[in-house]
């Protein structure tokens, strides 16, 4: 984000008027300034993980707030801290920013959609300029300066977006890692196409629980619990109830908390079927 | 065009890109700094 960071500074200024504007804007652009400064030696892209990813962002924000409190000796350290930290959410709209590592970069990538970026940042700037004017600009001359400031900022944004529109990179918003992770890694080969995976995804429960136990289940080996390998059938809960839900063929409800099972309730429902593993013989009782 | 890209921080050479980016960061600072100073003077 470009002039949107200024909008953040203007909004924060209305919360704490005692904070000077220049340190506040420096803090709102803090990660960019730090990246540029370090980039003179190694290139900006290489420095981005130290300035824009979350660990570096928090470290930079704490350092900036501490320097402000110690050097400037004015109230409003938390405003500097907030301005620095809000850099990341603002950049989320316009680019891809890392969370913890280069593998998990997320963002809406509006820099590759310059008209949308221009509209978004201009609207944010105009709203925050109006907010700033409502708080600080009470005379016509003051309001005129706010209008000049807003027009200049929107013009800057237009210049940047014009430059960005010369680069025809595709728009690529990302909310998660690009790496695809299959649900059934043990059964579906990666080479299978989407057409082959979708039916498997829809029938996954029925197909994997109806095996005869020779093949390992996708959720682990159930050799000691034969009842869970039976398939599911649609079953109405009781007479007069229209809700039909899939239950296993033995029609015994699942025991969610085996250690809490009492002799009544769930245990009684099992009947004379296979013994549950938690039922142990009591030596003294059976010896009688 | 290369001059504009350099100003915009998008030049091919990373050193020119860093200088352009620094200039780009300086512009809003100057605009808002001057405007805020003028507004506060008349407060």
Image: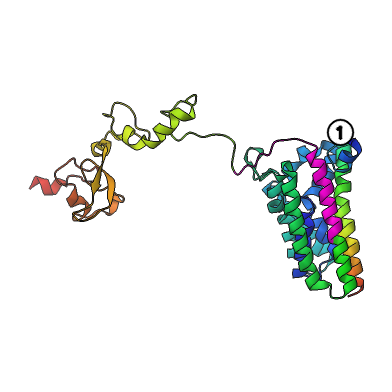
Taking the spot 78% from the left edge, 67% from the top edge, the residue there is A130
Residue B28: image quadrant is bottom right
Query: Quick check: B33 above or below A18?
Result: above
B25 displayed left or right of A185: right
What colour scheme was applied to this rendering of the protein? rainbow
Q: A107 and A225: which one is in front?
A: A107
Pointer 1: what residue?
Answer: B13
Query: Quick check: A44 above or below A9?
Result: above
The quarter of the rendered structure image containing the N terminus of chain B is top right
Residue A65 appears in the rendering: no
A195 displayed left or right of A256: right
Residue A134 appears in the rendering: yes
The quarter of the rendered structure image containing the C terminus of chain B is bottom right
Q: A198 and A47: which one is in front?
A: A198
Would you say the magenta stretch is mainly helix, strand or loop? Answer: helix
Q: Position of residue A175 (x, y in %)?
A: 60, 44
Q: Position of residue B39 (x, y in %)?
A: 89, 69
Q: Position of residue A192 (x, y in %)?
A: 47, 25
**Magenta stretch holds residue A163:** yes
Q: A6 and A18: which one is in front?
A: A6
- Crowding near pointer 1: few (<14 within 10 Å), some, many (20+)? few
Taking the spot 72% from the left edge, 43% from the top edge, the residue there is A113
Residue A134: image quadrant is bottom right
Label 1: which secondary element = loop
Taking the spot 79% from the left edge, 48% from the top edge, the residue there is A32
Label 1 marks which chain's residue? B
* Region in magenta: A150-175
Q: Position of residue A224 (x, y in %)?
A: 26, 36
Q: A194 and A55: which one is in front?
A: A194
Q: Residue furthest left?
A: A288
Query: Quick check: A139 above or below A279?
Result: below
């Amino acid at each position: 984000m470009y002039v949107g960071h200024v909008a953040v500074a203007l909004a924060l200024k209305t919360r704490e008027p005692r904070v000077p504007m220049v340190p506040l804007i420096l803090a709102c652009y803090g990660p960019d300034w730090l990246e540029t400064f370090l980039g003179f030696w190694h290139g900006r892209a290489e420095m981005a993980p130290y300035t824009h990813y979350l660990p570096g962002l928090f470290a930079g924000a704490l350092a900036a707030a501490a320097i402000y409190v110690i050097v400037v000796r004015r109230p409003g350290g938390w405003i500097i801290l907030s301005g620095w930290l809000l850099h990341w959410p603002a950049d989320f709209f316009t680019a891809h920013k890392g969370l913890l590592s280069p593998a998990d970069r997320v963002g809406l990538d509006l820099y590759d959609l310059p008209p949308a970026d221009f509209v978004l940042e201009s609207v944010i700037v105009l709203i925050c300029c109006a907010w700033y004017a409502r708080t600080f600009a009470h005379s016509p001359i003051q309001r005129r300066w706010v209008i000049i400031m807003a027009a200049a900022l929107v013009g800057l944004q237009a210049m940047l977006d014009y430059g960005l529109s010369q680069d025809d990179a595709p728009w690529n918003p990302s909310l998660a890692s690009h790496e695809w992770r299959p649900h059934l890694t043990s059964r579906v080969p990666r080479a299978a196409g989407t057409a082959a995976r979708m039916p498997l995804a829809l029938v996954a429960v029925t197909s994997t629980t109806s095996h005869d136990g020779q093949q390992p289940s996708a959720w682990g080996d159930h050799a000691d619990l034969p009842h869970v390998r039976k398939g599911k059938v649609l079953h109405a809960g009781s007479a007069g109830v229209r809700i039909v839900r899939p239950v296993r063929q033995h029609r015994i409800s699942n025991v969610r908390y085996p250690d809490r099972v009492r002799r009544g309730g769930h245990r009684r429902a099992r009947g004379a079927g296979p013994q549950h593993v938690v039922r142990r013989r009591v030596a003294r009782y059976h010896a009688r | 065009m290369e001059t504009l890209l350099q100003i915009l921080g998008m030049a091919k050479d990373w050193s020119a890109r860093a200088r352009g980016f620094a200039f780009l960061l300086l512009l809003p600072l100057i605009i808002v700094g001057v405007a805020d100073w003028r507004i506060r003077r008349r407060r």
